[in-house]
Image (spheres, rainbow, N blue to C red):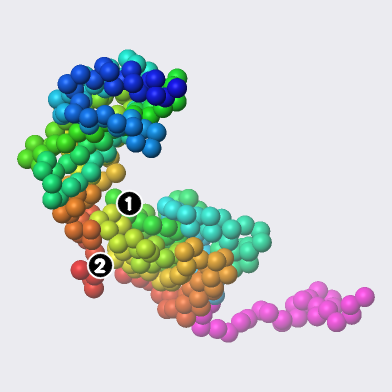
Amino acid sequence: MSDAVFDRVRSGLGDLAQDAAVSHGVLVIDATPAGVLPLVRGLKASGFDMFLDVTAVDWPAQAPRFEVVWHFYSTTHKVRVRVKTRVAEQQPEVDSLVALYGSAAFMERECHEMYGIRFRGNDDLRPLLLYEGFVGFPLRKDYAKEQEQPLVPYREGFQ
Amino acid sequence: MNDKVIPIQAAGGQPSGAFEYISTKKDELVGWARKFSLFPYPFVTACCAMEFMAVSSTPYDTDRFGAALPRFSPRQSDLLMVVGTINHKQAPILLKVYEQMCEPKWVMAFGACATSGGFYQNYATLLGVDRIVPVDVYIPGCPPRPEMVIDGIMKLQDKIARERHPILTKEF
């Protein structure tokens, strides 16, 4: 049953995606940055009504450096779709999906503070898990893991 | 049945003289009183809370040590129990709670995370609450067994009993 759904999605992709293949039962769509928003609009229309996740992958040695990954679920067809796109370090910017899925707002905030991906159209990208004044993006590979940014000055004897 | 009862009052209603005076040092008396009236403030942030619940409940019964009644206002408590991981975002809250507590006050680092950051060593976690507040007793374990918590409470009581207890402090 999932094959029929995937075939229907794949046939409607056009030039929005470079590649689409099924991997571990999930349809993986490799989209162009500009194609994400119209592609997801089409996904939502074809039954993928639940926004599961947005996150990013940092590939320091590759260009473009960042891969932004979304997951969607269809509660009618019981299948998942993964949408991926690549953005460059100089302009890590993709379109926000808040207009389509309200639940994207918080997850885009988290992705923004952890990886520094900007989401065009989400005007509330304040830190969610981190705090105001935190410098840098801790889940990027070039952020030193043990680099602390304490809010309270340490007592004497602790540096 | 028991004819070995020592009468508080002698026959005829006259005071017997028993227990009318005791002789001790002020610090020992105040320390004895304070060590059996610990009012913990549980600053509970993580999974060690389960062990805190276990140690507070009937089978282990910290009431035996006068340390059973948690006060959820720092102004009414004198033992700050930091139970769980403290991250940098949480640290100002912990410091504010500590500063609101009245003297005399003691701090217990409950479990590996509060003691040293535990297995976390990253951008988010405070590597031990002693970096921001002075800690009196550290309890190891991830999480600590209730016996270890009770041992920690008894160690803290010994410490309180041995401490100086000035009636006038620099705050007054």
| SS at mark 2 in the image | loop
User: Which quadrant is the N terminus of chain B positioned in?
Assistant: bottom right
Amino acid identity at mark 2: Arg
Name the residue: 15% across, 50% down.
A60
Q: Is residue A121 left or right of residue A22?
A: left
Q: Is residue B40 left or right of residue A103?
A: right
Instruction: Give coordinates of residue A149: x percent, y percent.
Output: 20, 56
Instruction: Give coordinates of residue B109: x percent, y percent.
Output: 42, 65
| SS at mark 1 in the image | loop
Residue under pointer 1:
B90
Instruction: Give coordinates of residue A93: x percent, y percent.
Output: 14, 33
Q: Is residue A130 left or right of residue B51?
A: left
Chain holding disc 1 = B
Q: Nearer the viewer, residue A51 or A84?
A: A84
> Is B85 rendered above or below residue A35?
below
Amino acid identity at mark 1: Gln
Residue under pointer 2:
A155
Read off the magenta span.
B1-29
Q: Nearer the viewer, residue B76 or A158?
A: A158
Q: Nearer the viewer, residue B76 or B108?
A: B108
Q: CA distance from mark 1 to mark 2?
A: 16 Å
Chain holding disc 2 = A
User: Which quadrant is the C terminus of chain B positioned in?
Assistant: bottom left
Name the residue: 27% across, 18% down.
A11
**Dot 2, how many residues are within 10 Å of its Cα: few (below 14), some (14-19), or many (20+)?**
few
**Dot 1, how many residues are within 10 Å of its Cα: few (below 14), some (14-19), or many (20+)?**
some
> Is A142 rendered above or below residue B150?
above
Q: Magenta residues: mostly which secondary structure?
A: loop
